[in-house]
Amino acid sequence: MTSPGELERTLRENLRGEVDFGAAARALATMDASNYRRVPVGVVRPRDADDVAAALRICAEAGVPVVPRGGGTSIAGQATGVGVVLDLTRHMNALVSLDPAARTAVVQPGLVLDRLREAARPHGLTFGPDPSTHSRCTLGGMIGNNACGAHSVAWGTTADNVAELAVTAYGGASYRLGTGWAGAPAGLRELVAQNLAVLRTGMAGGFSRRISGYGGLDALLPERGVEVARAFCGSEGTLGVVTEAVVRLVEAPRAPALAVLGYADESAAADAAAGLLGFGPLTVEGMAADLVGPASGLPRGGGWLFVEMRDEGAARSLVRAADAVDSVVVTDPAGQRALWRIREDAAGTATRMPGGGMAWPGWEDCAVPPARLGAYLREFRALLARHGLRGTPYGHFGEGCVHVRIDFDLVSAAGIARFRAFSADLADLVVSHGGSLSGEHGDGQARAELLPRMYGAEVIRLFGAYKDVWDPAGGMNPGMLVRPARLDENLRFEVLPATPFAGEVARCVGVAKCRSTDAAGPQVMCPSYRVTGEERHSTRGRARLLHEMLAGEIVTDGWRSPEVAEALDLCLACKGCLGDCPVGVDMASYKAEFLHRHWAGRIRPLSHYTLGGLPAWLRLIAALRLARVANAAGRRLPVPGLTRERPLPPLAGEPFTRWWRRTVGAAAAPGSPVPPGPAPASAAAPAGVTLWPDTFTEHLAPEVGRAAVTVLRAAGLTVSLPPKGVCCGLTYLSTGRLDRARAVLRRTLDAVEDVRGPVTVLEPSCAAALRTDLPALLPDDPRAQRLAAAVRTFAETLEEYAPHWRPPRLDRPAVGQTHCHQHAVLGDAADRRLRERAGLGGGLSGGCCGLAGNFGFEPGHHEVSVACAEEQLLPALRTAPPGAAVLADGFSCRTQIAQLAGLPDGSRARHLAELLAEAL
């Protein structure tokens, strides 16, 4: 048997692409989006088809299995492997050509679906199948799973849209598959000829979503035209590796309209779905109230069908004919996207149970003939109850395909036994309705063991013979589909310790929304991945490394792991994942915990002392009145632990609280109120507001604090400051000094214990720290929860406590960026409404500015920091209309803009409070 070291050397000598058998690379490939975990020997990132052939030849000679991997979003475990993983996303990700006249495209397997759709869009074309993971799933993965998506009602599965495939088998032989026997492997024609009766009878009664097993094998029948490429689709990497594909494109509707139909409940919606197919819909998607909740824009009902039609007229005709409780037709593209986002995030949001528990995949996409869907769902709900389980069905009701996450206990022996028993019962239920165990995601390890219940012994024997024609050595993705592993083996949870942190890390289910590079909309997650394109710098990649660190099998250094430290080094702690990840993974908090333990008992990097201790340093400088000296020194001398590529922002000559005491006088020392300005005639007694003097406002941007006082008083509010120095602990959190953060926060709670009413925090990152990190760090102190609940942003304060105040009209466009912490933690709805009332038009960009507090000032981060700014923020500023106000509430965002944007002389980014104060 060839040793891993020998295999690695041989692969390196014969491949142009990267060969990585290191701990980090292996850890990143142990899991996909399923419940399963398999540890690979190593990872290969082939450059081209020649590399793929060489890797498959070398691995076959060594007797080492191979599994091809795309976006790693497979639900059933088929993108995990025990041998060599071929990562086809790094280099083999090109759109080779696109022929609008022929409506075809030639693609490499690692091409992300949305990149193909973007290229086809100018020609009025698209690729029909569109899984909810379209922003990160790859064409090769879609071919492997025979993926479908919401539009399969109109355009079919991936197999329906594939014309030709270039495939390399285990051992290195290459084939070109299309229609007819030319290019097929030896023995395939003979196998079909010997099994015509089995193909015609054992696989009869199929419907559009029969994806399970080698569900397309009957495409090899002579009366079906011997569609060899079609039959290969859905083979889940068990036959060979696709190196190129010719796919068909379809005409995209020019102005689709979305009809949302409300029904009494989910079963009523399911009963109605099949009856709508005669209207020619593009999609018929179903969701119930326990998934979407009281979402705005939905008509009355307890279950809904989302039916997309080619135009508004067709949508309104459908509504008139549908027997729905209520309905709405949405033609606005933005409104449609908002509703579809609910559906696309469902694979993650369904993972969170109402009581805070988690639900898991495993029975994610069973399908039955659409006419049987309502009856099936009623029995499915009853089966869940019988096993004491909970789940939230949703999915492609027009094709009878139901997605669901179920709250399995996949840790205890009793829970795993229940998982196994339920799986067998559900398989029997699906088969009793003439259905398929998989309706689009493939069987993988989750369901392959149960395929004999669906197909019977003769068909299962034929499946084995089909695989053996392609892969006689059994080296392609063993344990999947044919001769499968047990569905309760290799569960990813069994290697984790029973600790709260391990439970948090396990939240990442791998749907990989963090791997999206779509710049549309407000999404922030995950800025470092969007810049580097490396899995280890995605939220999922970091979660996987933490998972393996806790498991201790591959990553063996525990909390001292250099692999985890390296991956987390480029985490900006933007908290984008907390808001954008469908399951709310909070990598900023995980990073803080890791750094806390990683550096325990050791001397930390200098930046942890200089930047991490920033509040204490700035208070000392202010107390000694050395701001001018510090500014001069910062311009001339390097600061220990900070990058030399970035100038330091100047300290204010007069801190905010000193201005407060000087301006208002002794009667309004900290803790005393500033009288309100002229109150609105209809207002009652003025409300009292505590204005939080955060470190950035206090020492670096006191003009923001002064502006806020002006505006709050003009709105009729009384303003006071906390009675003594306070700090949210943010810089200690971001550098993982959690003990210090807790001590600082306890002192803060002592200082503000008697504060009542709203606490207005001008710096979004500080507000986010007080609202979420404070109660998490001090869960046993009731004062922490009280203060967190009192925190308001500037706009929230005005909206809640001065609702009748009319802001001055600025009537000019605004550009800039919503702070990433505000996007993820606080929300910006109140800010958008305030900007609208003030006549500030336009929307702010998404993404992260890239400075992210201490991140952009730390050595080795400058290039990534600038690249993050170039992703959305700086392009938005360059294309801003003349006279636009540059708006950024975060100090980091304003600093990044000042240093990189090249704004005209005298122009700078401002906090919203500053713009309003200037107008007053």
Image: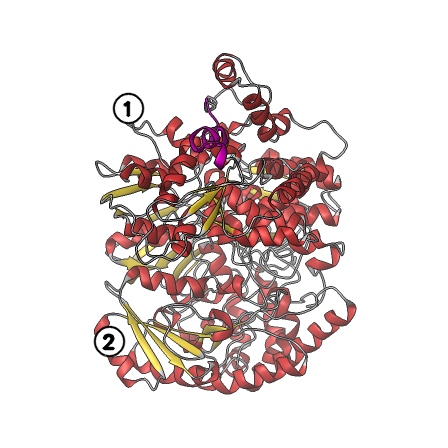
- In the rendering, at what x and y percent does residue 618 appear? 56, 26
Residue 192 appears in the figure: yes
Say whether residue 811 is left or right of residue 542.
Answer: left
- Vertical placement of residue 711 versus 150, above or below: above
* Residue under pointer 1: 905
- In the rendering, at what x and y percent does residue 367 appear? 51, 77
Task: Magenta stretch: give its range.
Answer: 653-667
Q: Which residue lies at the image location 46% right of the left edge and 34% below the top edge? A: 892
The foreground one among 242 and 687 is 687
* Amino acid type, label 1: Asp
Q: Residues under labels 1 and 2: Cα distance?
A: 55 Å
- In the rendering, at what x and y percent does residue 335 appear? 32, 63
The foreground one among 221 and 266 is 266
Q: Main secondary structure of the magenta part?
A: helix
Label at residue 314: 2
- Vertical placement of residue 158 versus 563, above or below: below
Dot 2: element: helix
User: Can you tell which quarter of the image residue 370 is in?
Assistant: bottom left
- In the rendering, at what x and y percent does residue 528 appear? 50, 40
At label 2, counting other C-alpha atoms closer than 10 Å, the crowd grade (few under 14, some 14-19, many 20 or more) is: some
Q: Nearer the viewer, mark 1 or mark 2?
A: 1
Quarter of the image that includes the C terminus: top left
User: Can you tell which quarter of the image residue 745 is in?
Assistant: top right
Say whether residue 559 is left or right of residue 321.
Answer: right
